[in-house]
Image: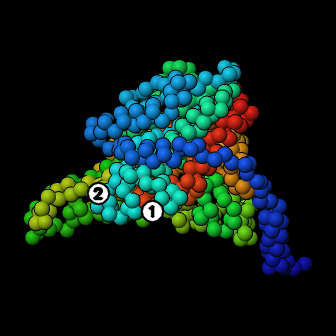
Amino acid sequence: MKFHWSKIVLAIVLLLAIVLIVLTLTHKPWPQQNAKPQFPLPDSAIVHMSKAIQIPTISPEDTLHIDTLHFQKFNEFLSQSYPLIHQHLTKTVANGFSYIFKWQGLDQTLAPIILMGHYDVVPVEQASLNMWKYPPFSGTVSEKAIWGRGSVDDKSGVIAILETIEELLKEGYQPKRTILLCFGHNEESTGTGAMAIVDTLQNWGVRADLVIDEGGEISTEKLKDVPRPIAFIGVAEKGYATFQLQVNIPGGHSSKPAKETAIDVLAKALYQLRSKQMQAHITAPVATFLNRAGASSSNFLNKMLFTNQWFFGPIDKRILGASPESNAMIRTTIVPTILESGVRENVIPTIATAIVNSRILTGETTQDVLKFMKNVINDYRVEIKITGDFNTEPSSATDVHGPAFLAVQEAITDVVSNVIPVPYIMIGATDSRNYRKISNGVVNFSALQDSKGYHGINERLPIADFTRCYNFYRQLISNSAALIHP
């Protein structure tokens, strides 16, 4: 009997295709739902947001040069703008200008929730001032938005939380569980304010069921083939590590250069480092993200690729690797950020130095990055060492089936119709990484939609976004007792 291998192979391929099509069709889109009726912003909210922006609480890299006058002024602004909060909540100061407000709950057996944010902002480049539509610290209200540095990152979160609590106090609302408001003052630099807050909470014996900080947001732009808003909910943070690469080769006069100089060797090392990437991994949060978003795709091929990762995993990695943002979600990134060498144009330098920054994926470590760099560069003349004051390993991931994530997910679906909530890994660093010491339920989310001007020119907060943030915190507080358990 003669075997027809080609027919057998064809039959297997057809069977596999049928299985993939059937499995794809069984992946139903995320359920659609209508948002609940929304509360209007309190009358004072826009005025308060504008005033908050007008106080330039700039967080410098060198914390010795912090302008304490503006931070004191912000403290006075809080006292004047939120009298009920200061009357009914206890206020604790940490590290000079970071604050904890405690709203005592009715049921002391329930663990607290923490609503957090930071009120410091990044500087504005002097060279870009004439590119701003309105002065960056004017707090101008125009074109249905509030304009200025910090309007998105992160005074939108801080003021939305404060407006929510102040209004609930006016209404006579009493929370079932204790609510802690925690606001850091130097998230954009050292984060020591958040560290001091966490130390204080640890001394109080606090173990929170939920911690929510800035991070993910709603988007209708990032996935064009998904015709619904997607809420990106951060459940983990990548690690952060900085390395120094240094080459030391005797220099001399530029008229008689040697075959290789310190700059040549360093440039080659950096080229090697940028030519190769660390291995890609689809972590559990990203896998869930792809499944949820993919199931709602209007493109059948994309739906098949992302909902059948068991088969198309390598292709999924290639697709995600094509974009800088999605590539950063699936692998540890390594990039040079500072180069230093030379003193004059006619002197070949002896020393060439580069600073390289890495954002480390969950499951890998700083030592893994160091080993990779040494193997890729493979040149004993390039000395590599860990440097910098701010290095941290990747965080653990909050359970997407746990009560903290479900509480945030529920609040989002209450304020945004037909939204698809998806977990993802934060590629940047926030103050919330410190809070994992006191909670397994750290979540990063702001109810902004495709935020405008983040760390850039013409940063602004649409009033529609502000209203959504306000309603999101109201729903989260309302839902928290039922969804989160002690």
Crowding around mark 1 (Cα neighbors within 10 Å: few <14, some 14 to 19, many 20+) is few
Task: Report if residue 467 is visible in the image.
Answer: yes
Residue 289 percent across, percent down from the top left: 66, 54
Give the answer, above or below, for where 432 lies relative to 267.
above
Residue, x 42% and y 60% (percent of image)? 458
Residue, x 62% and y 26% (percent of image)? 178
Amino acid at pointer 1: Lys
Where, by quadrant of the figure, is residue 186 drawn? Answer: top left
Residue position for label 1: 276
Q: Which numbered disc, 2 or 1, marks the residue that appears first in the sequence?
A: 2
Q: Nearer the viewer, residue 392 or 404?
A: 404
Q: Nearer the viewer, residue 354 or 140?
A: 140
Residue, x 67% and y 68% (percent of image)? 225
Residue 121 percent across, percent down from the top left: 40, 46
Q: How many marks?
A: 2
Question: Considering the numbered disc 2 on the image, is that residue within a helix, a strand or a loop?
Answer: helix
